Amino acid sequence: MPLQGEGPDSHSKEDTTESDPLEEVKKIASDNRDRWLRAVADLENFKKRTAQERSKLIRYQNEDLLKDLLIISDNLERAISHCEDKYASSGLAEGLRLVTNMLKDTMAKHGVSPIECVGRPFDPTFHEAIAKVAGTGAAPNTVVEELEKGFMYHDRLLRPAKVTIAA
């Protein structure tokens, strides 16, 4: 005999308050799948980012060496200009020109290119203004003289050009 309050209606109330174990397992499985998909996506993003950083490192690995070679190139240019004043026809001047051209060709082969700036508008991204002169006949903020050549390394600034601009 059923006790009072224990009829067929009392069990149905308990069943509705309890959650279905199958639904709980499905929810846990869905959450785990979502976390797994996020982890896979994070891993793929990490791989792409690492590959990009690695390619940048490889592409710009010689930057410091090339900066040092620019100083040597500048000094060779100065030596050539000095030789042309006094010893224009000597073998020394010709030898310096050949060595300088070899150095420029080698640097160009590795991605170094000079920045052309005389007669162009001043751009602080690529130029460093050393002086401002008036009465040159050029438009204001136009580069009128290049004191030290600037260079790009692939698409990155290696050294800004030191210039004089029109006032």
Image: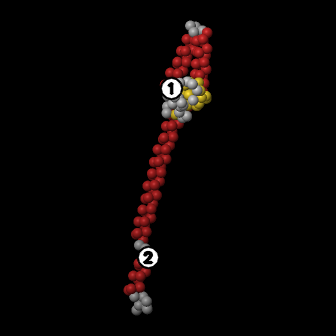
**In the displayed structure, would residue 17 be above or below residue 87?**
below
- The label on residue 64 is none
Relative to residue 26, is residue 82 drawn left or right? right
In the image, residue 70 sits, relative to residue 96, either above or below, namely below
The residue wearing badge 2 is 18
Q: Nearer the viewer, residue 8 or 49?
A: 49
The residue that appears at 49% across and 37% down in the rendered structure is: 55
> Observer-nearest residue: 133 or 97?
133
Tell me: 11 left or right of 74. left
Q: Which tag, 1 or 2, sits closer to the chain's start?
A: 2
- Res. 164 image quadrant: top right
Separation of marks 1 and 2 at Cα, in angstroms: 83 Å
Residue at 40%, 88% in the rendered image: 7
- Spot occupied by residue 8 in the image (x, y as percentages of width and height): 38, 86
Q: Are marks 1 and 2 in contact (CB under 8 Å)?
A: no
- Asked if residue 134 is positioned above or below residue 19 in the image, the reply reads above
Count neighbours of disc 1 (C-alpha within 10 A) and say few if under 14, some if 14 to 19, many if 20 or more.
some
Crowding around mark 2 (Cα neighbors within 10 Å: few <14, some 14 to 19, many 20+) is few
The residue sitting at the left extreme is 8
Front residue of 80/106: it is: 80
Q: Residue at point 40% right, 69% down?
A: 22
Number of the front mark, 1 or 2: 1
Residue with the mark numbered 1:
119
The one of 75 and 48 positioned closer to us in this rendering: 75
SS for dot 1: loop
Is the N terminus in the top left, top right, bottom left or bottom right quadrant? bottom left
Farthest residue in the top direction? 89
Q: In terms of secondary structure, where does tag 2 sit?
A: loop
Answer with left or right where residue 22 lies relative to residue 102. left
